[in-house]
Image (spheres, rainbow, N blue to C red):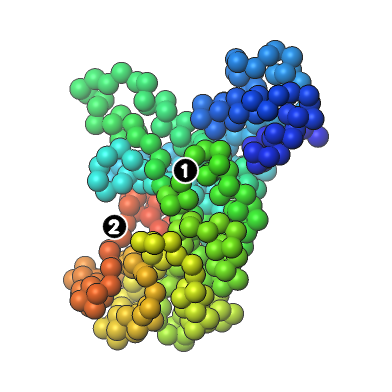
Amino acid sequence: MKINFKHLQKKELESCLDNLGWESYRTDQIIDWMYKRHAVSFDVMSNLPRNLRTRLNDIAYLSELKLLKTETSLDGTIKFLFQLDDGETIESVLIPNVRGNNLYTLCISSQAGCSMGCKFCETGRLGLIRNLKTHEITDQVLAVQRYLEQFRSDVFTDSNWEDKKIRKGEISNIVFMGMGEPFNNFNEVMISLSIFTDLIGISKRKITVSTSGIVPGITKLSEKVPSVNLAISLNATTDSTRNILMPVNKKYPLKKLMQACRTYPLSPKRRITFEYVLLKGINDSRNDALRLIKLLGGIRSKINLIPFNRSQSSSEFIRPDEQDVQEFRKILVNSGLIATIRKSSGSDISAACGQLRADYLNKS
Ligand code: SAH
Ligand code: SF4
């Protein structure tokens, strides 16, 4: 069976080339083609000798995600629907950075679906379909980079400028905040992190792994990839509410979770991000804000308030009014915490947090 070169880390690629009897600089050339020039076949690697390309074609291949659909939101967010080799589908979301500097954050998926069953989340409703392989994680970045690249060489005219400008930029940040719980696919996510940093050249400080609160995963992440950013989907301030919203809390209750955060080794100036989905009448009271302040005591944190995004399927939850969201934030900020309100990028195309379902509901 042929080897997918996208599944290999640098050392493995080197030893593969070594076994074939080629010098190590050939590995660097191949990596450059795969990860900088986004080659999808060995045939285009024009600086490799022809006999090496033929040999590579015999033993290996380069995987590629099939882009089924893109949707562009009014705010410039672009949602990508990809098909995997077995026909399953996943989504990635490209969000323009607020500074309007042509840099984007790419929100990627680590699983098709998710088994965690959070009550407010559309991906959770799907259940777990399957874990993604390493290359299915990294190929999301490569496919979107390639998508952006095609616009870079375009000639702009006055009439298409606005449209083209949107897609002219580059991915500066990667967040594991798409479909799936990254720590339920730990090994593949770890290998993808090493490919992002070592081969694609994205700094660890620009990558964020978000978890619903799987405590052993938090500890293992700090051992395996120190200084990657950690985000925790907190979403409640008491065990009783969190047990209902996020079943993971029954296994890893708040005390254990906050203890793991408190001992998470942070590099200087770094903070743990706490995501907090605001649900009207459930977790958005003044007392919740006060409890949140207490919970985060002693942790270098920043809070990302996410007013609930409604999904297409019916939901028991309600988004709080803008004024209540501002009020909640004010209580946190007045206590000295850093708290921002996440704008619902791409909500008109169901690309906002918690809305990703990769067209599964349309399929059924
Ligand atoms: N599974 C990981 C990574 C996904 S991140 C995790 O849960 O952390 C997705 C983020 O969107 C999480 O912070 C989650 O709390 C939030 N979210 C889920 N459903 C949402 C909804 N309907 N509205 C707003 N945010 C939502
Ligand atoms: Fe899974 Fe995260 Fe959604 Fe919970 S919020 S169901 S962990 S994707």
Direction from residue 3 to residue 355 in the image, left or right:
left
Mark 2 CB within 8 Å of ligand 1: no
Residue at 33% over, 40% down? 103
| Residue depicted at x 71% and y 24% | 23
Q: Is mark 1 within 8 Å of ligand 1?
A: no
Compare residues 204 and 41 and report the one nearer the observer.
204
Q: Find disc 1 in the rendering and name its residue.
A: 202
Residue 251 in the figure: left or right of residue 340: right
Expressed as whole percent of the image width and height from the top left, the position of residue 48 reads: 65, 17
Q: Is residue 165 above or below residue 157?
A: below
Quarter the N terminus occupies: top right
| Dot 2: element | loop
Residue 259 placed where, x, y %? Answer: 49, 79
Amino acid marked by disc 1: Ile
Q: Which mark is residue 343?
A: 2
Would residue 171 be visible to someone looking at this image? yes
At mark 1, the secondary structure is loop
For badge 2, the amino acid type reads Lys
Q: Is residue 220 left or right of residue 123?
A: right
Residue farthest toward the top in the current orientation of the protein: 50
Q: Which mark is residue 211?
A: none
Q: Is residue 132 visible?
A: no
Vertical arrangement, residue 147 with respect to residue 361, above or below = above
As rendered, which of 355 and 20 lies closer to the eye?
Answer: 20
Q: Is residue 338 above or below residue 71?
A: below
Q: Earlier in the sequence, mark 1 or mark 2?
A: 1
